[in-house]
Image: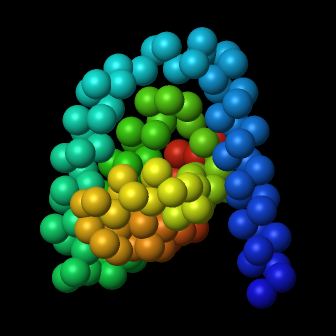
Amino acid sequence: MGGRSQYEDECRRALAEEQAKSLAETNDWEHVDRERVHRDWDVLYKEIAAALDESLPGDPQVQELVGRHFDIICRFYVPTREAYVGMALFYGEDDGMREFHNSYHPRMVEFLGEAIGVFAERGTGFAA
């Protein structure tokens, strides 16, 4: 169990460091079309919510949806595998983020976190 929480701490740290660096280098993500990002996330989260009760986090259709989530994240910056897992942890640990995500489905944060974990293990396209 200790190893898992150490890994989670590394993921939280990676997220914080990578986001801070990206924010500083891009004038607070000035390059991102935030209105479009929020529309795209809304569509995506509705699709995940619709699939959630009938699917497992590792199912191909769920992993395709998580791939789209990752692509949206990459509009801000390309995270390392650890920072992407850290983002899933953040969704569950930050009250506002948990409330936002779970407004789509009561189990959204838990499910998305598991699906992101699978994607991080299997996926490609992460920063080194």
Reply above or below: 11 against 24. below
- Say above or below: 69 vs 48: above
For the question of whether residue 100 can be seen, the reply is yes
Residue farthest bottom in this picture: 1
Query: In this image, 58 relative to 14: left or right?
Result: left
The image shows residue 77 at horizontal and vertical percentages of 55, 31
Residue 20 in the image: above or below residue 31: below
Q: Residue at x 46, y 52 (%)?
A: 97
Residue at position x 77%, y 62% from top? 9
Q: Quadrant of residue 16?
A: top right
Pinpoint residue 72: horizontal percent, then vertical percent. 39, 39
Evaluate whether residue 88 shows in this view: no
Q: Report whether 17 appears left or right of 107.
A: right
Residue 99: x and y, percent? 39, 58
> Is 36 in front, or is 75?
36
Picture residue at 36% right of the left edge, 25% below the top: 34
16 or 115, nearer to the observer = 16
Q: Is residue 61 left or right of residue 16?
A: left
Quadrant including the C terminus: top right
The image quadrant where one finds the N terminus is: bottom right
Residue at image position (71%, 55%) is 12
Q: Is residue 111 left or right of residue 13?
A: left
> Within the image, what quadrant is residue 78 found in?
top right
Residue in front for this viewpoint, 42 or 106: 106
* Above or below, 63 relative to 27: below
| Residue 90, horizontal then vertical, whole percent | 58, 56
